[in-house]
Amino acid sequence: MTDEELMQAICNGDQDAYQTVVKQHLKSISHYAFRILDNQKDTEDITQEAFLKLWINAEKWQPEKAKLSTWLHRITHNLCIDYLRKHRNIQTQENVEEENEKRTDWRDSHADGEEERLQESRLKTAVNSLPENQRSALMLCHYSGFSNKEAAVIMNISVKALESAIARAKRSLRKQLSGANSAQSEEKARLRNYPNP
Amino acid sequence: MHNEMMTIEDFTHFIETYGADPNRWPIDSNKSIKGFLLDNTSAKKVLAEYQELEQRMDSYGVPEFRGLEQKVLKQALPPQRNSLLAQLLNWIIPKEASNKQLWRPAVAACLPLMFGIVLGNYYSFGIDTVIDEYDYWEGEFAFLALSDYSEGMINE
């Protein structure tokens, strides 16, 4: 069945069609929500709500304007933003910079086995420190595989604004991660030269 | 973007915007970007740095959401707010047509006929099918025989 047929069936109350759509899009929707919210419980709630909204507003989807996955991501994106606005303060450029200055937490671990975990944790910290619009742009284009144009539709911004956000996000990540790496190398060198007794 | 006009800043901005994977580059810029890369070591270095960054970004894992699919599927869904006409049409001609439901369109097709019979049986709508003038067979035969009806009646 095509997306149009599935959505028409959902409009007519067909739960089998709903089940098919859920199975097709659950992974991408939950992963996107998780990368925005960084919290498993909230991600589950938002994912459930996104599919409930799909069921309720099925007749509002216009296939000539956006693909079903784009529309569904837009619903999820809006829910995530609303959630963040209600429950947390969205990070602005100013408090991001403050946080970056404070971040020195990776210097404690030096064991080889922990290296990968450390890298991932460092990446997550860096990604989560990005302002919301940059993080969303990065998630949609890099992780969810949307084109810049589709990501702009999802975020309801112009393609230029999207491209600016994604460029800033990558520049910021590159700066933070290379800074983290050089700090770690310096620490390792220091420990080699002056080992703890 | 033309190769001779491009600077390393333009190239870096392009990589930041479209990513380090050439498969994601816009077709119209692909040739000029690849041309710029061929004879520019700084551009190659920038590309390598962003490729490494993107590889690192791929390590951002997402936990497995066990039971989420069941939760989504089992959540209570409100009834769809379809119009009565849409509901009726959907009942008459179901999307998943099966032999068991063939009686529905058949009944729908017969309904106007049955309605017409019932209506015709009870209401005449002012049309009287009995013609008083032809109460007698003789008169009717005379009429059919194209004889002078009035004359015959007078003779009697």
Image (cartoon, rainbow, N blue to C red):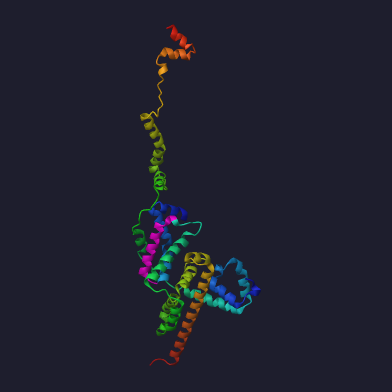
- Residue B21: horizontal and vertical position, in percent? 54, 71
In this view of the protein, can residue B62 be seen by the observer?
no
**Rendered image quadrant of residue B104:** top left
Does residue B22 lie above or below B78 as drawn? below
Q: Which quadrant: the C terminus of chain A?
A: bottom left
Which residue is found at the position 58% from the left and 67% from the top? B26
Q: Residue furthest right?
A: B4
- Residue B21 horizontal side relative to residue B121, left or right: right
Tell whether position A46 is magenta: yes
Residue A113 at what x, y percent from top left?
Answer: 41, 80
Q: Name the foreground residue: A16 vs A94.
A: A94
Picture coordinates of residue A27, whole percent (x, y): 42, 64
Name the foreground residue: B136 vs B5.
B136
Residue at figure coordinates x 46%, y 89% from the top left: A189
- Residue A47 point in image, percent of width and height: 39, 64
Residue beneath the point at 62% across and 69% down? B31
Say whether residue A118 is magenta: no
Query: What span is colored magenta in the figure?
Result: A38-59
Q: Nearer the viewer, residue B15 or A150?
A: A150
